[in-house]
Amino acid sequence: MNIAMLTNNYKPFVAGVPIAVERLADGLRAGGHTVYIFAPDYHVKDDVETKERTRAMESLENSMDFNPGCTFRFPTTNVKMAGVMPLPLPIFSYLDSIFSELNIDVIHVHHPVLTGNAALHLGRKYNVPVVFTYHTRYEQYIHYAAPFKSLDKRAKKDEAFDAAAAQALVSFTQMQIVQRYLNYFAEQCDLVLAPTRTMADYLEPFDLQTTMEVVPTGLSAEAFDEKTQAADIRKKYLPEDKRYLFCTVSRMAKEKNLDFMLRSLALAKERIGNIFRVLMIGDGPERKTLESLTAELGLTDNVVFIGAVPNDEVCAYHQACDLFLFSSQSETQGIVLLEAFAASLPAIAIDATGTDDLIEHGENGMLTANSETDWAEKLTSMIKNDMMGEGLSLKEMGAAARQTAEEYEESRIAAKVVHYYQRAIDEKQDSTERSWSRHFRPRLGTGAM
């Protein structure tokens, strides 16, 4: 099967969607399928990608048997969305010139705009099904749009500002503009994949007419490997006067709710004392603000900002720690939670989409209300129970977390996706045949007698 994956962001950009795209592509290729990834040009030289692209195109031209696919980088401007993602130039003609050579069986798009629009055009032109993974609740990201940034700044500075009216405008935009467009786009596709059952349930009231299936992001086999670097990381970041090492992995952006986590940690510190350290792994536009808040809360001795870490090295940090901390409420699937689970690391997280599908409360982690007090109390309870030998220890919860992660091995996920691809292809062909038969049906009174 020849598969085209279209995405608005991909490595070296670090986020959940690039990880999901890469893992699914790896799983599909391991199963003998050809996957071409179309992603933005970040203007970073990558000789490996160039060689893969050349090799793939040569195999097409020479009818060679083995062609696992490659990554095509479409042209982009210097303008960046949300400060990090380059805005593409008009890309349809670029994509079309390549598609005509690839004999694509199915298009899998990972965003509803830009590449999403191109995917629909290509699907219609080449009569192949378009599959869309609903990775993100985009209505929760409108604060990146310039008008809403301005509203947010004014609300913070102007006491006379009508915050209620501003919130009403945000809510209207979220549900009447953004969500309506998302529903429209999804219904133009042949199949929608939701990364979790919770996300599918969220979409159910919108009554989408497109078939929907639940397909989570998989975990590579390497995610379960023991990392020798873990011991050195623990020794480096856990001083003798501390007992526990926690971590979180997150892009440092407003929607990740990391200020909530820091304030909750300050409350927990009052209850259990200065016995822990937290590794903040990741980078983003809110980092300086979060560093300032850390100092204001008296957590400078407890919180270490590590910065961005290559994804293949994150596992070693997980294995060095005792507990994974999570505070985001905007996830459709907690990929970072699964990665922590693969490293036998239990988690504490707000009960929200993307977490309640994975965390069995009291078994492989803890779910909390959207309350700093509750989050701090649950964390305190986990630590005190571990110290006093009451209930499940963190190690026992970590073993349960590992069992959860094993259900998400990427080869299993890829096999499920291939099944859904094939069904979409068959339905597309059936629909086309019915359309042709109607178009060429003999008129009454004509034809052979």
Image (cartoon, helix red, strand yellow):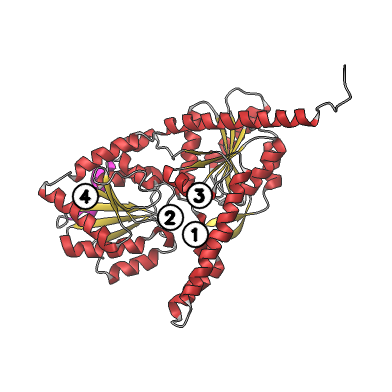
Q: Name the foreground residue: 417 vs 33.
A: 417
Secondary structure beneath dot 2 equals: loop
User: Mark 4: which secondary structure?
Assistant: helix
The 10 Å Cα crowd at callout 3, few under 14, some 14 to 19, many 20 or more, is few
As shown in the figure, which amino acid type bears the numbered disc 1?
Answer: Tyr
- Residue at mark 2 to residue at mark 3: CA–CA distance: 18 Å
According to the picture, the residue beneath numbered tag 3 turns out to be 205
Residue 273 in sight in this render:
no
Question: Which dot marks residue 330?
Answer: 2
**Location of mark 1 (residue):** 141
Residue closest to the eye, 300 or 375 = 375
Residue type pointed to by label 3: Pro
| Magenta stretch in the rendered image | 226-239
Q: Which residue is mark 4?
A: 235
Q: Secondary structure at mark 1?
A: helix
Query: What's the CA distance linking mark 1 and mark 2?
Result: 9 Å
Q: Quadrant of the C terminus?
A: top right
- Residue in the picture at 63% in, 50% down: 75
